[in-house]
Image (spheres, rainbow, N blue to C red):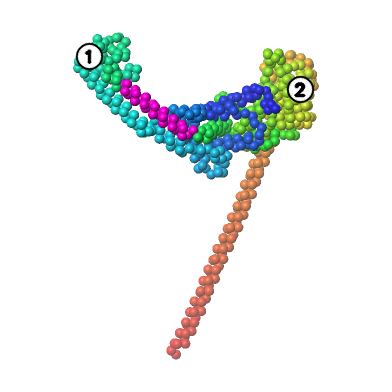
């Protein structure tokens, strides 16, 4: 079953540009391959898994600066090469293998340090990945941090390189001794020095004396006055150095071959590491794109559903941002009850943008990409996406534009079902309006019966009438500012839209007598219908504005009442606390007074008792 129709679906909705943007965000050829293999999917669990992966990586992009994102080298071809005995990795390839394995290990370590609930899906991906400490350590013995073969990679290599250095040192000393003697003999200028020609050390000798210095003439100056001679002694020493360099190369090949033999049993596991590295690059690219578009993973259902709020066409957003213009978000809803939306309205009013936004975002979602919608949005899975948009006139097949549209419609009615999403732009156009409208209405009725989901744009009045009464289909209008004659690019679901044909014609200066004749030809009833649509839309906007003002006023009143209620409760609370405190203070004061009175009475009684005692003991 063909899930996508036609074959150039991606180009028609702009997904080819999304794919290109993802490729530019990849840092490896492996990630780019994942981008190119990305395709429309219908498996709910698979899509959900991919959406969650990207969602987790978005958090890494936003919150972590330490995620390893360097040295994503592709060593798969090099590793494939050493499957054969005797083959080996060149030092440059070995260096790339080391650094790419460092990246794999760093990514695994990054997730191992995180709690399971932080990045559960991405962390699970690292469970099968090996970090190969043995291989890494073996490479570290062979090459240094600059990717060069170490002198001590083997005892034989160390000895050979020492011999080369000694020979080069002796050759340099002997060469300078010969130069000094030649200067003393007057064959060479006093200020002359050793030169290099074709990798050979030579002495610049006056052309007249070139036969006096025994050796091989390698070159001459442009004027012919100077010859460059390599002394015979140096020739022999150079040959010995060359032999030592051949020995060095043989020893390096031996070391690299032994290393290839050591890692050959692990090639399958190593290949998986590079699949992992490529997938991480791919998921990272998708996350970077999502952050750039402010995209999210909305509520995701297994059944077909489109319930989007503040949906944005990402490519249009980028274009408008360059022009310092703001994009108008789209609210759109397709359910089992109302599964086809018929959008009408003026040209250049945004109908096609709505249609392409729906197609692009749904396709992105089912390719495992996050989409720029509001968090309250709900999304679902469709088994098929069909589109009929643009001029498909075919010179090869001798098809007119209208015939091409009919071919598409034939495919639609034969293959659509209740899990198909169709997108049709300028439905019914391309032929005589009366006949084209009738055929379009019949096709629309069939698609409605099939339970197909769809977004369809049209100017045909008969289709607007049909949508007003048929089950499963609903009208939608692209709003238009009739006062200033400018499109608002806002979709209003529930009412059909006017094409504003006469108003637009009048605005651009078409003669009034032509418009009057056109009114007579099309019929007053048709003009009145279009005029009534505009009045309805105008009145609806007016009352919506009124309702918004009333809501604002009501909110202010509610907030004020709530504030007064809160303040009253606070005052009552403070009053109770004040009374309670005053009562406590009064009780404490009263207790203190009573205590003092009691003490005073006791003191008086004691004083009276003392007086009585004094009277009894006083002399008579």
Residue appearing at x 60%, y 24% in the figure: 16
Outermost bottom residue: 620
Q: Secondary structure at mark 2?
A: helix
In this rendering, the answer to whether 586 lies above or below 501 is below
456 or 129: nearer the viewer:
129
Q: Residue 385, relative to residue 48: is it above or below? A: above
Task: Please provide percent x and percent y for residue 609.
Answer: 49, 82
Nearer to us in this view, 128 or 590 = 128
Measure the alpha-carbon separation of dots 2 and 1.
101 Å
Q: Is residue 221 left or right of residue 282?
A: left
The answer to whether 352 is drawn above or below residue 54 in the figure is: above
- Residue 243 in view (yes/no): yes
Residue located 58% across and 63% down the image: 583
Identity of the residue drawn at 69% across and 19% down: 504
Q: Position of residue 284 (x, y in %)?
A: 54, 33
Q: What is the crowding at mark 1: few (fewer than 14 residues within 10 Å), some, or many (at least 20)? A: many
Q: Which range is magenta?
A: 238-264
2 or 1: mark nearer the eye: 1
Q: Does residue 404 belong to the magenta stretch?
A: no
| Main SS category, magenta section | helix
Dot 1 falls on a residue whose secondary structure is loop
Residue on which the image places disc 1: 187
Residue with the mark numbered 2:
440
Do callouts 2 and 1 mark residues in contact (Cβ within 8 Å)? Answer: no
């Amino acid at each position: 079953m063909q899930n996508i129709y036609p074959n150039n679906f991606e180009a028609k909705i702009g997904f080819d540009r999304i794919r290109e943007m993802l490729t530019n965000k990849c840092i490896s050829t492996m990630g780019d391959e994942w981008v190119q293999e990305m395709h429309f999917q219908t498996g709910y669990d698979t899509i959900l898994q991919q959406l969650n992966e990207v969602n987790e990586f978005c958090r890494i992009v936003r919150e972590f600066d330490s995620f390893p994102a360097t040295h994503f080298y592709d060593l798969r071809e090099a590793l494939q090469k050493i499957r054969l005995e005797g083959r080996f990795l060149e030092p440059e390839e070995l260096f790339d293998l080391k650094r790419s394995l460092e990246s794999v290990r760093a990514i695994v370590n990054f997730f191992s340090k995180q709690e399971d609930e932080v990045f559960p899906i991405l962390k699970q991906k690292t469970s099968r990945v090996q970090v190969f400490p043995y291989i890494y350590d073996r490479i570290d013995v062979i090459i240094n941090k600059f990717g060069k073969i170490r002198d001590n990679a083997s005892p034989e290599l160390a000895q050979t390189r020492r011999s080369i250095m000694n020979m080069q040192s002796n050759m340099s000393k002997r060469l300078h001794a010969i130069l000094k003697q030649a200067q003393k003999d007057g064959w060479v200028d006093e200020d002359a020095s050793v030169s290099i020609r074709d990798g050979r050390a030579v002495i610049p000798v006056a052309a007249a004396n070139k036969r006096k210095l025994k050796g091989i003439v390698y070159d001459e100056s442009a004027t012919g006055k100077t010859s460059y001679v390599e002394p015979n002694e140096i020739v022999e020493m150079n040959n010995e150095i060359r032999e030592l360099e051949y020995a060095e190369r043989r020893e390096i090949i031996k070391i690299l071959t032994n290393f290839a033999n050591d890692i050959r049993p692990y090639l399958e596991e190593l290949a998986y590491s590079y699949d992992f590295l490529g997938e991480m690059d791919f998921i990272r690219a998708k996350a970077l794109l999502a952050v750039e578009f402010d995209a999210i993973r909305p509520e995701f259902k297994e059944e077909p559903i489109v319930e989007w709020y503040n949906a944005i066409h990402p490519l249009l957003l980028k274009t408008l941002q360059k022009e310092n213009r703001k994009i108008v978000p789209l609210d759109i809803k397709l359910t089992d009850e109302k599964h086809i939306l018929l959008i009408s309205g003026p040209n250049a009013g945004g109908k096609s943008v709505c249609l392409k936004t729906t197609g692009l975002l749904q396709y992105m979602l089912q390719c495992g990409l996050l989409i720029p919608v509001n968090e309250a949005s709900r999304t679902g899975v469709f088994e098929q996406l069909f589109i009929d948009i643009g001029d498909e006139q075919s010179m090869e097949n001798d098809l007119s534009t209208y015939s091409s549209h009919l071919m598409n419609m034939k495919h639609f009615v034969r293959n659509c079902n209740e899990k198909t999403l169709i997108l049709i732009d300028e439905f019914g156009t391309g032929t005589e309006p009366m006949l084209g409208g009738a055929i379009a209405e019949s096709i629309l009725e069939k698609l409605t019966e099939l339970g197909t989901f769809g977004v369809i744009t049209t100017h045909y009045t008969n289709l607007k009438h049909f949508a007003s009464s048929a089950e499963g289909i609903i009208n939608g209008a692209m709003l238009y500012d009739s006062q200033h004659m400018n499109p608002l690019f806002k979709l209003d679901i529930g009412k059909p839209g006017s094409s504003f044909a006469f108003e637009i014609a009048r605005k651009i200066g078409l003669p009034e007598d032509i418009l009057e004749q056109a009114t007579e030809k099309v019929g007053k009833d048709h003009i009145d219908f279009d005029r009534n649509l505009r009045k309805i839309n105008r009145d609806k906007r007016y009352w919506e504005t009124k309702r918004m003002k009333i809501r604002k006023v009501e909110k202010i009143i509610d907030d004020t009442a709530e504030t007064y209620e809160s303040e009253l409760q606070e005052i009552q609370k403070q009053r109770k606390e004040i009374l309670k405190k005053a009562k406590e203070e009064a009780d404490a004061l009263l207790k203190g007074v009573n205590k003092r009175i009691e003490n005073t009475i006791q003191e008086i009684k004691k004083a009276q008792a003392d007086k009585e005692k004094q009277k009894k003991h006083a002399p008579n």
